[in-house]
Image (cartoon, rainbow, N blue to C red):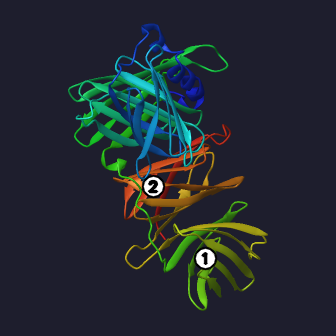
């Protein structure tokens, strides 16, 4: 964050906050045996929750996104206060955090790169409150909080990676911190999040000692922790986007015999498409005017492919989209971006699932993520973070890109 330049210091804080090099190390905290720890993780793309029990053997569960909980087993080493857990293709390694907390990493199937985790001591009979959200402003990214009584932990994921925070709650106020060494400078930076907890909402600001003029706004809610809804076919219509070389368009494809559809490219008139759809493979082969489309829809409702022969002279444009049904239609939002990546943005929403793309004069990026509780969170790998708020009439927010020459900016999109 350029709260904080979290994006810039993320990798350093990951080492400090998750590996024992930060301020936690001086207190030499320990993890209790035969104790339950509950918390959250985020990878910068995915997020979820976990529960670990420091028994012999150690046991636990991990829930990634909308998936069913996965059982974990492994070892808890008392002398080092560490968990080493596996299960369902996932691996978890933790160390002791501040008093009563643990921190660590999670890798495995369905997690992009390495996820960062934080958990606090919470008996199995206790139910911590989980807040999921985003930070926006000088930077953008994902935040996950777990609050129980007077204790709180959080994981933060931005451009430079992820790190953990921990702190205390007093009444409706919570303060969480993380300390690490700034890469390339050797300077110590302390990141602080001051938030207010009000029922289902958590809001506040973030700042840092090394970058005192930079801030981000933090917004999270219990509603935003709702898992993405699974899209169920057969899908009757696919709505999507296509883009390349600074140009963008929208596409609609309808399965059938024959299949039908249309493309609107670069703000021009719609071009009618017709062709074939193979229900077994999900493959569309479509054409109209000078345009040819080859696209495939998978069982989860995602549409990918390409279009050639576009009237602007662009040789090939990439296609992406979502499938919908009469009971669960796709809503499409079109808009613009400002800042270093000024250009266009197109989003498709079906339930809590959202996909789309941003395109600007020198590049483009496909987006995937979710909208829940009025909060939008989208990523393109770990290089572009798009977040915002809104509803059925449209959304707006900010983005942050890992390319420093592009920096951050804003976006807005409404129905199209």
Q: Residue 316: percent from the left, percent from the top?
A: 76, 68
Give the alpha-carbon distance from disc 1 to disc 2, as whole Å: 24 Å
On the image, which quarter does residue 12 sit in? top right
Secondary element at tag 2: strand
Secondary element at tag 1: loop
Residue 196 vs residue 111: left or right? left
Q: Residue beneath label 2, please? A: 370
At x 57%, y 26%, the residue is 9
Position of 317 relative to 262 (above/below): above
Instruction: Bin the neighbour count of mark 2 within 10 Å (Cα to Cα): few under 14, some 14-19, many 20 and up.
Output: many
The label number, if any, that marks residue 393 in the structure image? none
At x 62%, y 83%, the residue is 277
Instruction: Bin the neighbour count of mark 1 within 10 Å (Cα to Cα): few under 14, some 14-19, many 20 and up.
Output: some
At x 65%, y 16%, the residue is 185
Residue 304 vs residue 204: left or right? right
Callout in the foreground (1, 2) = 1
Q: Residue 47: percent from the left, percent from the top?
A: 46, 44
Query: Foreground residue, 294 or 357?
Result: 294
Q: Residue beneath label 1, please? A: 282
Q: Residue 329: percent from the left, percent from the top?
A: 42, 74
Q: Residue furthest top?
A: 26
């Amino acid at each position: 964050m350029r709260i904080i330049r979290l994006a810039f210091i993320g990798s350093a804080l990951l080492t400090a906050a998750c590996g024992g090099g930060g301020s936690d190390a001086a207190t030499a905290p320990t993890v209790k045996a035969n104790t339950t720890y509950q918390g959250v993780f985020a990878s910068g793309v995915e997020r979820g929750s976990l529960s670990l029990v420091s028994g012999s053997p150690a046991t636990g569960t991990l829930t990634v996104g909308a998936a069913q909980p996965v059982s974990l087993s492994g070892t808890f080493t008392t002398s080092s206060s560490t968990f080493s857990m596996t299960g369902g293709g996932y691996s978890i390694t933790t160390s002791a955090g501040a008093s009563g907390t643990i921190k660590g990493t999670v890798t495995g199937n369905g997690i992009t790169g390495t996820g960062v985790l934080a958990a606090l001591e919470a008996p199995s009979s206790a139910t911590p409150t989980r807040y999921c959200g985003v930070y926006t402003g000088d930077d953008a990214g994902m935040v996950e909080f777990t609050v129980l009584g007077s204790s709180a932990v959080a994981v933060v994921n931005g451009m430079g990676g992820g790190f953990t925070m921990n702190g205390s709650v007093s009444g409706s106020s919570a303060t969480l911190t993380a300390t690490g060494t700034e890469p390339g400078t050797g300077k110590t930076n302390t990141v602080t999040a001051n938030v207010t907890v009000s029922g289902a909402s958590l809001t506040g600001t973030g700042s840092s000692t090394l970058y005192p003029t930079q801030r981000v706004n933090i917004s999270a809610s219990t509603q935003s922790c709702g898992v993405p809804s699974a899209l169920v076919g057969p899908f009757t219509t696919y709505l999507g986007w296509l883009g390349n070389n600074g140009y963008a368009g929208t596409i609609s494809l309808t399965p059938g015999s024959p299949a039908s559809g249309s493309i609107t490219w670069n703000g021009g008139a719609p071009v009618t498409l017709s062709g074939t759809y193979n229900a077994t493979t999900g493959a569309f082969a479509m054409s109209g005017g000078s345009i040819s489309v080859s696209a495939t829809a998978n069982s989860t409702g995602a549409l990918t492919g390409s279009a050639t022969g576009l009237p602007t002279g662009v040789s090939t444009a990439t296609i992406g989209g979502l499938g919908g049904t009469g009971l669960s239609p796709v809503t499409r939002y079109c808009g613009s971006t400002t800042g270093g990546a000024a250009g266009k943005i197109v989003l498709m929403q079906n339930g809590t699932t959202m996909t789309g793309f941003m395109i600007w004069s020198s590049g483009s990026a496909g987006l995937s993520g979710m909208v829940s509780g009025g909060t939008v969170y989208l990523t393109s790998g770990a290089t572009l973070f798009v977040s915002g708020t809104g509803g059925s009439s449209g959304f707006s927010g900010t983005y942050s890109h890992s390319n420093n020459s592009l920096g951050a900016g804003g976006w807005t999109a409404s129905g199209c």
